[in-house]
Image (spheres, grey):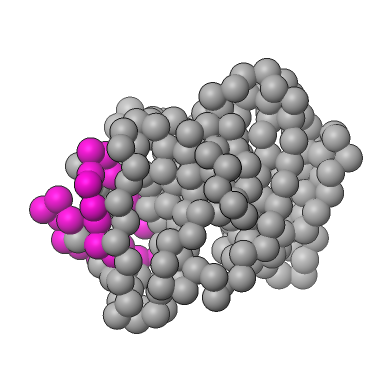
């Protein structure tokens, strides 16, 4: 199964500082056909106005990955962690037994982020947070693991048998994605447009569209523009 989910079909929320699109049911948006994909529960596309953001609030037993598309996000939490994550980089927070945190745009321009929530495999563990820079050169023309529960070198830790992968592709450049056995995957181009081909499917996914994949052996991804893609691979 490969399903294209155009950006225009996503759930939405708007207030005076946040413009959000929901790839899966979240908060007041409920679509019975889009209640997660395996252990992937949330993929939110948030645009945050300058000097605004998510005030301190709590989570438990969730792996929360934040990928910055544009601008920067500043994190603070009840463990004393603090950090600023810039465009193209990623942070992870494992909520474990409970953590309070804020995510603020302290910049003078809009910040655009993806927030990805994956159900943990280790409830009740000590919470934590980590962030890392991933220079775009390292992702040119190939998929690189940004976060993983399998301990890949250089990847940020999460507590689930899942991976977050990313790549940058020049126009005409292709990469073949092969999910690990027993895994589903969700692809979103952060920038540009890619052609998706495989399992009888062939379509173009533009920036911020979603592509759900289950029981797939291989998918060919070809950039139609300068593109940056992100994939969450999770237990089905």
Q: Residue at x 22, y 47 (%)?
A: 217
Relative to 191, say whether 161 is above or below: above
Q: Is residue 138 magenta?
A: no
- Magenta-drawn stretch contains 219: yes
Can residue 191 be seen here? The reply is no
Residue 211 seen by the camera: yes
Question: Horizontal placement of 18 versus 195: left or right?
Answer: right
Q: Residue 35: x, y in percent?
A: 38, 30
Q: Residue furthest right?
A: 80
Q: Taking 83 as reference, is 139 left or right?
A: left
Please tell me which residue lies in front, 207 or 78.
78
Q: State which quarter of the image contains the C terminus.
A: top left
- Give percent across and percent down for residue 28: 50, 32
The segment highlighted magenta reads 198-221
The number of discs equals: 0
Viewer-nearest residue: 165 or 116: 165
- Give the residue displayed 44% in from the left and 46% down from the top: 232
Residue at coordinates 47% horizontally, 74% vertically from top-left? 140
Name the residue at 47% across, 38% down. 162
Q: Position of residue 146 (x, y in %)?
A: 55, 54
- Left or right: 226 as drawn, with respect to 212: right
Q: Is residue 86 above or below residue 116?
A: below
Residue at the limit of the structure toward the bottom, as seen here = 171
């Amino acid at each position: 199964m490969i399903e294209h989910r155009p950006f225009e079909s996503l759930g939405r929320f708007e207030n005076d500082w946040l413009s959000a699109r929901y790839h899966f049911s979240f908060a007041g948006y409920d679509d019975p056909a889009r209640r997660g994909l395996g252990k992937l529960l949330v993929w939110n596309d948030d645009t945050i106005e300058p000097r605004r953001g998510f005030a301190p609030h709590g989570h438990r037993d969730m792996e929360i990955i934040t990928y910055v598309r544009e601008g920067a996000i500043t994190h603070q939490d009840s463990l004393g962690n603090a950090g600023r994550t810039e465009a193209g980089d990623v942070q992870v927070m494992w909520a474990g037994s409970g953590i309070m945190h804020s995510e603020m745009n302290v910049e003078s321009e809009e910040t655009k982020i993806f927030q990805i929530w994956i159900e943990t495999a280790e409830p009740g563990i000590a919470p934590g947070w980590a962030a890392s820079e991933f220079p775009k050169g390292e992702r040119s023309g190939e998929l690189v693991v940004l976060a993983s529960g399998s301990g890949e070198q250089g990847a940020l830790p999460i507590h689930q048998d899942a991976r977050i992968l990313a790549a940058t592709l020049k126009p005409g450049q292709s990469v073949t994605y092969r999910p690990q056995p027993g895994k589903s995957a969700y692809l979103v181009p952060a920038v540009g447009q890619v052609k998706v081909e495989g399992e009888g499917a062939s379509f173009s996914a533009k920036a911020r569209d979603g592509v759900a994949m289950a029981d797939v052996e291989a998918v060919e991804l070809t950039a139609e523009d300068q593109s940056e893609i992100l994939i969450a691979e999770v237990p089905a």
